[in-house]
Image (cartoon, helix red, strand yellow):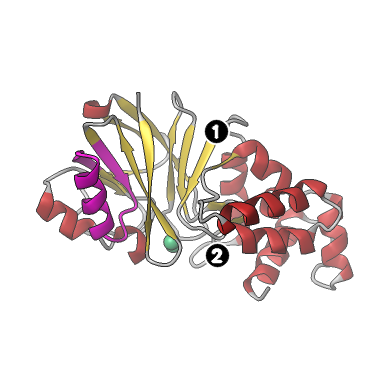
Amino acid sequence: MLKVLTVPAFNDNYLWLIHDDTHAAVVDPGDAAPILDALRAHNLSLVAILLTHHHNDHVGGVPALLQHAKVPVYAPRNDRISNVTTSLSEGDNVHISELDLTLSVLDVPGHTRGHIAYVAKEQGWLFCGDTLFAGGCGRLFEGTPEQMLHSLDKLAALPDDTKVYCAHEYTVSNLRFAQAAEPGNQAVSQRLEAEQAKRARNEPTVPSNIALEKATNPFLRAREPAILKTLQGEGRVKGGDTVAVFGALREWKNSF
Ligand code: FE
Ligand code: ZN
């Protein structure tokens, strides 16, 4: 039975250890120290490193981890990253034999040009880096609103019960924005309350799941008339074109 261990790092990053109580694969080790501590504490040996995109808070720990264990490094083909042993793009599968784990790769450009996501279909897990967040999405550093919308559409098409392992604890501020974007959405207010309670107990709000994101995440709801109405009321968009609505939402969130 595979499990996922949450390893907090920096201010608000989550690094993920997929393990079977013996072997472990790490997703997006921005820092090596908390991963090495977790491996030691749980008596796990590292067998693979999986990267979603090139930002330092996702790859910074790779050199130190490779000093500790010489393991394969999987990473997106279209982001420039050092120490990679296997470059990936959509349609590729990663098989980690020690864990008997198969991950399929999706291209999800937008936050970066080459950003990928890993889907463990059998387990119903999604590791999506800085593409889909609980209640939000990543900033568009290298891609266009159209690319990000298409990337998020792919993730939204995964089964409803897919667990969403995103890379940051941004949920409460994301949901405050969701409330402004769609004030009449009761699911958003209920979720905001529930997630605030988790944070007050110092619990992570991640993983989320696809059903909850489809119900509450404005970036998966850019086709909702209520969101268009808010944006028009704010004078942020004219027509009802979904890409324009999505772009205006993302733009508004940048300064919210
Ligand atoms: Fe990032
Ligand atoms: Zn990040």
Mark 1 and mark 2 lie on one chain; the one further toward the N terminus is: 2
Q: Looking at the figure, which quarter contains the C terminus?
A: bottom right
Report if the beta carbon of the residue with label 2 is closer than 8 angstroms to ligand 1: yes
Q: Residue at x 28, y 61 (%)?
A: 31
Corner quadrant of residue 104: top left
In the displayed structure image, the side of residue 153 where residue 117 appears, left or right: left
In the displayed structure image, the side of residue 71 where residue 129 appears, left or right: right
In the displayed structure image, the side of residue 193 where residue 118 appears, left or right: left
Residue 45 image offset from top left, x and y in percent: 17, 39
Q: Which mark is residue 83?
A: none
Residue 80 image offset from top left, x and y in percent: 30, 60
Corner quadrant of residue 235: bottom right
Query: Which residue position holds label 1?
Result: 162
Ligand 2, by image quadrant, is bottom left
Amino acid at the residue labelled 2:
Arg
> Which stretch appears magenta?
24-48
Q: Nearer the viewer, residue 137 or 134?
A: 134
Q: Residue at x 43, y 53 (%)?
A: 115
For marks 1 and 2, give the one nearer the viewer: 1
Q: Residue at x 77, y 59 (%)?
A: 179
Q: Residue at x 68, y 58 (%)?
A: 175
- Mark 1 burial class by Cα count in 10 Å: few <14, some 14-19, many 20+: many
Query: Which residue position holds label 2?
Result: 139
Amino acid at the residue labelled 1:
Thr
Residue lying at the far front of the rendered structure: 201
Q: Nearer the viewer, residue 7 or 156?
A: 7
Q: Is residue 55 visible?
A: no
